[in-house]
């Protein structure tokens, strides 16, 4: 009877499946969470790139280095809205990623005396060196499985982009 019990293979597939299922579920859910994270990171990078591209095409009257670093406050609001939603006209447009509030910093960097000689080449002249617009966004990551408590709100995304203002 003991020999018959040890040589019986019925139920072996069920036992193997019971051992493999937790690992397979973990791999599937981890892959889904990683894909969601990379998608949201891509949306943040796309947003700051769009915002910097829009800001770079503004007039030197709106962004300039005449008296320190200057940027028009209305333009700052438009750049933030474009970065966050992808639109300028609709203030109520949904954000690129869920729960992305205004976590966007916009600064202007003016060239100093050591870099003005480099700024005088090309389309820029020495009377007004080209300002550089810097956009930094750090929204919090909204986890795919937020209700499970695996990832908390301490995880944040980061996107940064710089562009020279062309004054077009």
Image (cartoon, rainbow, N blue to C red):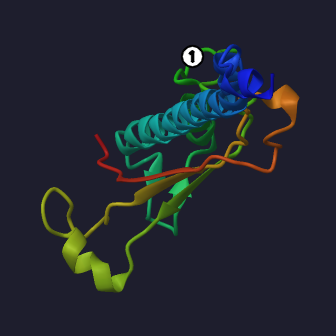
Which residue lies at the image location 66% right of the left edge and 21% below the top edge?
A: 12
Check the picture and name the quadrant holding the N terminus. Answer: top right
Q: Is residue 44 left or right of residue 124?
A: right
Of 71 and 84, which appears nearest the observer? 84
Of 22 and 28, which appears nearest the observer? 22
Relative height, residue 32 to residue 161 (above, below): above
The picture places residue 125, in percent across and down from the top left corner, at 20, 64
Q: Is residue 75 left or right of residue 145?
A: left
Which residue lies at the image location 42% right of the left edge and 40% below the top edge?
A: 49
Q: Which residue is mark 1?
A: 89
Relative height, residue 17 to residue 128 (above, below): above
Relative height, residue 59 to residue 147 (above, below): below
Check the picture and name the quadrant holding the C terminus. Answer: top left
Of 160 and 13, which appears nearest the observer? 13
User: Helix or strand or loop: what does disc 1 sit on?
Assistant: loop
The picture places residue 18, in percent across and down from the top left corner, at 73, 24
Residue at the bottom extreme?
114
């Amino acid at each position: 009877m003991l020999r018959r019990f040890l040589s019986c293979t019925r139920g072996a597939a069920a036992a193997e499946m019971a051992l493999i299922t937790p690992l397979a579920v973990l791999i599937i859910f981890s892959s889904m969470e990683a894909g969601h994270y990379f998608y949201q990171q891509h949306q943040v990078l796309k947003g700051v790139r769009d915002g910097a591209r829009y800001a770079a095409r503004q007039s030197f009257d709106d962004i300039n280095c005449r008296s320190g670093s200057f940027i028009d406050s209305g333009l700052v609001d438009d750049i933030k809205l474009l970065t966050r939603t992808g639109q300028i006209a609709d203030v109520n447009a949904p954000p690129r990623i869920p729960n992305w509030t205004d976590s966007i910093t916009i600064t202007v960097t003016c060239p100093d005396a050591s870099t003005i000689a480099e700024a005088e080449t090309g389309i820029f002249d020495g009377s007004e060196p080209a300002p550089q617009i810097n956009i930094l966004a750090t929204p919090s990551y909204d986890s795919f499985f937020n209700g499970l408590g695996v990832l908390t709100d301490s995880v944040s995304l980061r996107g940064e982009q710089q562009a020279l203002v062309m004054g077009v």
